Amino acid sequence: MGFPQLRLRRLRSHPVLRRMVRETRLSVDQLIYPLFVRPGSGVRQPIGSMPGQYQLSVDTLVEECRRVQDLGISAVLLFGIPESKDAVGSEAYAEHGIVQRACEAIKRACPDLFVITDVCLCEYTDHGHCGVIVERDGRRDVDNDATLPLLVKEAVSHARAGADMVAPSDMMDGRVGAIRSGLDEAGFAHLPIMAYAAKYASSYYGPFREAAESPPKFGDRRSYQMDPANGDEALREVAADIEEGADLVMVKPAINYLDIIWRVKERFGLPTAAYHVSGEYSMIKAAAANGWLDEKGAVLEATTAIARAGADLILTYFAPRLAEWLR
């Protein structure tokens, strides 16, 4: 029969057998590729803090979508950089806003590609916060309730432009329920919502804020994003979003919050996504560029850990490379 450790060694002895008995498997079907779209034509502007990532105009975005679809990636997540910004982020819900135009163009060129849109105001406001700002007792803060109708307008405008799913990332209380009601009333009861349900106030968002041109002009986002020290709170936030109608839930970031991914999946059993965020991406890219680690090995290990923790879907800027490696 053999000692248990010898049996394990025999199972690891051949690469084919090792793959056959692997507990956690990665698949291209699990990957969602985040993309940044901006005004212009022929634009492919490198993002300095995210090597290999770009701000794309609608025409080059469509080219990129064709490329990633050919790699087997079936879903993208769109973030918009508008032509102009104002206090209430009106370009977020404009009929011909940048994300709305991008949705229409992608669905014409790649009708089978699943298009998810980020629903938030931070990329569109001139102050960089995720909602409407009010002043109380000499302090400026986001007005949760005044923000909800604008998020509903944004989500409905994305649905009308052809989005297959909306993903509210703002972390306003009650926004999933408001968006669900708004979509239903507008005739989009079939459209699913992927809620950024446990989104932490993380230091790993820095490169994204350069990419989306959305750093807050004052203060920070800790009043509406979660304290990294809190785990039970994440379960309460997820439960609230599910109660309000979320079809999928997301944990963000991923690597530092594997325990939260695990707890969310174990507690609720709902399809669970995890966002391998910009800072996590950039750390690996920087270390690999300096020869400190092997990029392929590090990326595969990190994404396998995210899947092992319970994530059904992984949002990652490494998606095209992963698709190539997994093939």
Image: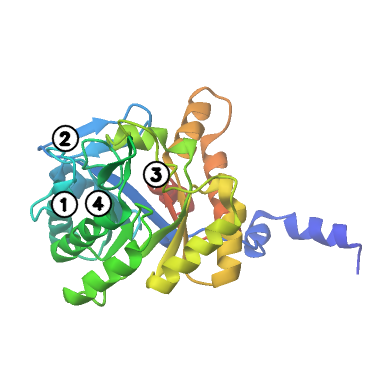
Q: Earlier in the sequence, mark 1 or mark 3?
A: 1
Q: Earlier in the sequence, mark 3 or mark 2?
A: 2
Query: Do the residues under discs 4 and 3 have CB atoms within 8 angstroms?
Result: no
Q: CA distance from mark 1 to mark 3?
A: 19 Å
Give the percent coordinates (x, y) of residue 128. Answer: 28, 37
Q: Quadrant of the C terminus?
A: bottom left
Residue 70 seen from this side: no
- Element type at marker 2? loop
Specify whether 44 is left or right of 18.
left
Query: Do the residues under discs 2 and 4 have CB atoms within 8 angstroms?
Result: no
- Element type at marker 3? loop
Relative to 211, say whether 151 is above or below: below
Residue at 35% x, 57% y is: 73
Foreground tag (4 vs 3): 3
The residue beneath circle 2 is 43
Under mark 1, the amino acid is Ala
Q: CA distance from mark 4 to mark 3?
A: 13 Å
Which of 135 and 100 lies nearest the eye of the viewer?
Answer: 135
The residue beneath circle 1 is 102
Under mark 4, the amino acid is Cys
Outermost top residue: 290
Give the percent coordinates (x, y) of residue 181. Answer: 26, 73
Query: Do the residues under discs 1 and 3 have CB atoms within 8 angstroms?
Result: no
Q: Quadrant of the N terminus?
A: bottom right
Q: Residues within 10 Å of mark 2 (few under 14, many from 20)?
A: some
The residue beneath circle 4 is 65
Which of 187 and 64 lies nearest the eye of the viewer?
Answer: 187
Residue at 58% x, 30% y is: 293
The residue beneath circle 3 is 317
Q: CA distance from mark 1 to mark 4?
A: 11 Å
